């Protein structure tokens, strides 16, 4: 009984931030279409393409079963390996729209540093992959 | 800063933005609502069972067990444990946040909780299979091989920056 009560209290305290996050995701997604992403990342290459792809991946929140086919088709259309690696890595590890939720649980400092460090490392991973596979 | 990003203000801003979009482009506003609804439904189907599991975890799993497996002195074993728990789970990252907090509350170290979170976010077996299928085994394998050590380094840095503690306000679970 105590555990259910704890779960309920927890759910109540989380309801509003979760609701806002999901709304924000819905909002962003209806503006950032796959076509737009494809156009922007596909044409740029090199360092700029990687950074741009990483920024995209950080902001949007797409499920893996949509993101991987998208990334695959971008790769075949001539996007650079580095840009795709940056996009996929930041997509899963850096979450701008989920940051308010993360802050609620772990505080600002943790959230900032986890996302910031993940972003930097995603760039490094992308660079290495671009060199090795590009 | 704190006031500016409060829940109420964000809600208000989102509402305002959506109304503005609605004025200019009905269809876009409709797709915002549809998208949000899809995510909300997904969340509602995932979160309640997880919360109940967390509740049971809090009541049934003794603190000592978690402390021993993932606490400050758990060393390499704790890291492997964090990776294992992160990989084994399913669901979006926001589900991992409450689980991470309850692990912390049960005595897991910040290092291991950070590893758990990052692994949950980026290394999942169905996701890897998917990546192999669409991006190739070379791409997926190399990315995984680079990601795992990165996660451990990120978590060590995070642990050092935060001095092993979450400078916390108040928390529902702790």
Image (spheres, rainbow, N blue to C red):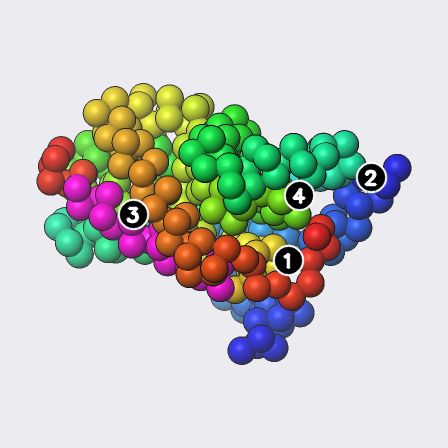
Please say whether residue A47 is visible from this viewpoint: yes
- Mark sitting on residue A77: none
Q: Secondary structure at mark 1?
A: helix
Mark pair 4, 1: CA separation: 24 Å
Residue at x-position 47% and y-position 60%: B162
Mark positioned earlier in the residue sequence (3 or 1): 1
- Kindly identify which residue carries mark 2: A4
Q: Is residue A121 magenta?
A: yes
Q: Secondary structure at mark 2?
A: helix
Residue at x-position 25% and y-position 50%: A123
- What is the residue that sits farthest to the right in this orientation? A1
Mark pair 4, 3: CA separation: 31 Å
Mark pair 1, 2: CA separation: 21 Å
Q: Mark 2–mark 4 contact, CB under 8 Å?
A: no
Where does residue B173 sit, x and y in percent of width and height?
71, 50
Q: Is residue A61 magenta?
A: no
Return the chain for callout 4.
Answer: B
Which one is in front in this view, the residue at disc 4 or the one at disc 1?
A: 4
Mark positioned earlier in the residue sequence (3 or 2): 2
- Kindly identify which residue carries mark 1: A17
């Amino acid at each position: 009984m105590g555990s259910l009560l704890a779960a309920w209290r927890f759910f109540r305290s989380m309801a509003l931030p979760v609701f806002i996050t999901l709304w924000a995701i819905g909002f962003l997604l209806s503006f950032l279409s796959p076509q737009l992403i494809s156009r922007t990342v596909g044409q740029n290459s090199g360092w700029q393409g990687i950074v741009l792809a990483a920024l995209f991946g950080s902001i949007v929140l797409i499920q893996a079963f949509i993101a991987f086919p998208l990334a695959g088709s971008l790769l075949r259309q001539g996007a650079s390996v580095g840009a795709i690696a940056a996009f996929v890595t930041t997509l899963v590890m850096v979450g701008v729209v989920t940051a308010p939720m993360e802050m609620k649980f772990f505080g600002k400092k943790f959230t900032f540093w986890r996302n910031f460090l993940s972003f930097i490392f995603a760039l490094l991973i992308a660079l290495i992959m671009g060199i090795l596979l590009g | 800063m704190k006031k500016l990003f409060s829940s109420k203000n964000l809600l208000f801003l989102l509402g305002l933005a959506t109304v503005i979009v609605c004025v200019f482009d009905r269809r876009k506003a409709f797709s915002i609502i549809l998208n949000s609804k899809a995510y909300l439904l997904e969340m509602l189907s995932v979160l309640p069972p997880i919360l109940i599991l967390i509740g049971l975890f809090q009541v049934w799993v003794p603190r000592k067990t978690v402390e021993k497996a993932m606490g400050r002195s758990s060393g390499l074993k704790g890291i492997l444990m964090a990776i294992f728990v992160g990989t084994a789970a399913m669901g979006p990252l926001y589900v991992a946040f409450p689980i991470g907090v309850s692990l912390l509350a049960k005595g897991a170290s910040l290092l291991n909780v950070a590893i758990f979170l990052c692994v949950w976010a980026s290394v999942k077996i169905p996701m890897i299979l998917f990546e192999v299928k669409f991006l190739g085994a070379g791409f997926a394998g190399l990315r995984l091989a680079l990601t795992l050590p990165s996660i451990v380094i990120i978590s060590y840095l995070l642990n050092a920056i935060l001095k092993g503690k979450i400078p916390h306000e108040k928390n529902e679970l702790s």
